[in-house]
Amino acid sequence: MAEQAVRPPSSEIVDGRAPVRRWRTVDIVVTAVLGVAFGVVFWAWNLLWSATGAAFAAFPPAQAFMYGVWLLPAVIAPLIVRRPGAALFAELVAAVLSALLGSSWGSVILLYGLLQGLAGELGYAAFAWRRFGWPQALLSAVLAGAMAAVLDLVYYYPAWSGGWKTTYLVVVVASTVVVAGVGGTALVRALARTGALSSFAAGRRG
């Protein structure tokens, strides 16, 4: 049973074929571990964001170049696990842990984790969870970044001018594409080359 839980089944996902929707034990564990690891990163990144805020007082939207780190789980988890729900699972776990460790934004961060995870999920859902390459990762990053920016503009910056809001949206999405889309995909492929992802389709096909 344990071997079956780790070993990829013969019907594992192959690009272009019907997706495997059943989660194995290893899928659940790895996605949870990703969420926990990034939850710690989120907590540290929250502190860095707060500490550097004064440097962007003249033009606050510029600080959004740092944003992409918060969307990494939503892009990376599906690239590795290749199961529907992986983006939502990982992003939400990371948000929950970040809140438990002490987020200056309070419980609203849970809503962020939920909606950002769902938005990231759509990048893969658009291809019926059959493909997990650069286009899917970048689309996931765009959607997750756009969701994050819209939430911020609604909750925290409703009084900004139209120009500032547009700039913020563009910078958040660009940051997410670069950090989570490009960086996340490159990270997963680098891990695959080491053999660390041998239990997953990502480790066998890239």
Image (spheres, grey):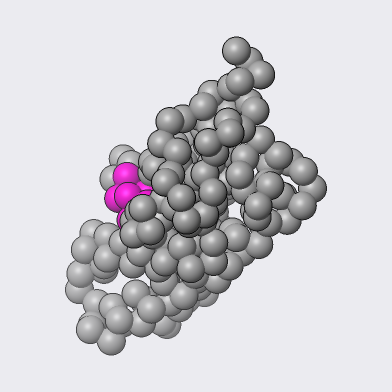
Is residue 162 at least partly visible in the picture?
A: yes
> Which quadrant would residue 108 be assigned to in this image?
top left
Determine whether 202 is above or below 134 in the image.
above
Determine whether 103 is above or below 97 in the image.
below
Toward the top, the furthest residue is 1
Q: Does 30 appear in magenta?
A: no
Q: Position of residue 158 (x, y in %)?
A: 20, 69
Q: Position of residue 188 (x, y in %)?
A: 64, 53
Determine whether 143 is above or below 125 in the image.
below
Query: Of 182 and 195, which appears nearest the observer?
Result: 195
Q: Position of residue 122 (x, y in %)?
A: 34, 56
> Which quadrant would residue 198 be assigned to in this image?
top right
On screen, residue 115 versus residue 195, left or right, reads left
Query: Of 145 and 19, which appears nearest the observer?
Result: 19
Toward the bottom, the furthest residue is 163
Determine whether 132 is above or below 149 in the image.
above
The structure residue drawn at horizontal position 38% and vertical position 58%, both measured from the top left corner, is 127
Query: Of 160 and 92, which appears nearest the observer?
Result: 92
Q: Does 119 appear in magenta?
A: yes
Is residue 113 at least partly visible in the picture?
A: no
Secondary structure, magenta segment, majority class: helix
Number of disc labels: 0
Q: Quadrant of the N terminus?
A: top right
The structure residue drawn at horizontal position 38% and vertical position 41%, both measured from the top left corner, is 85
> Which quadrant would residue 187 be assigned to in this image?
bottom right
Q: What stretch of residues is rendered in magenta?
A: 112-121
Q: Quadrant of the C terminus?
A: bottom right
The structure residue drawn at horizontal position 23% and vertical position 84%, both measured from the top left corner, is 162
Q: Position of residue 99 (x, y in %)?
A: 41, 38
On screen, residue 32 versus residue 140, left or right, reads right
Toward the right, the furthest residue is 194
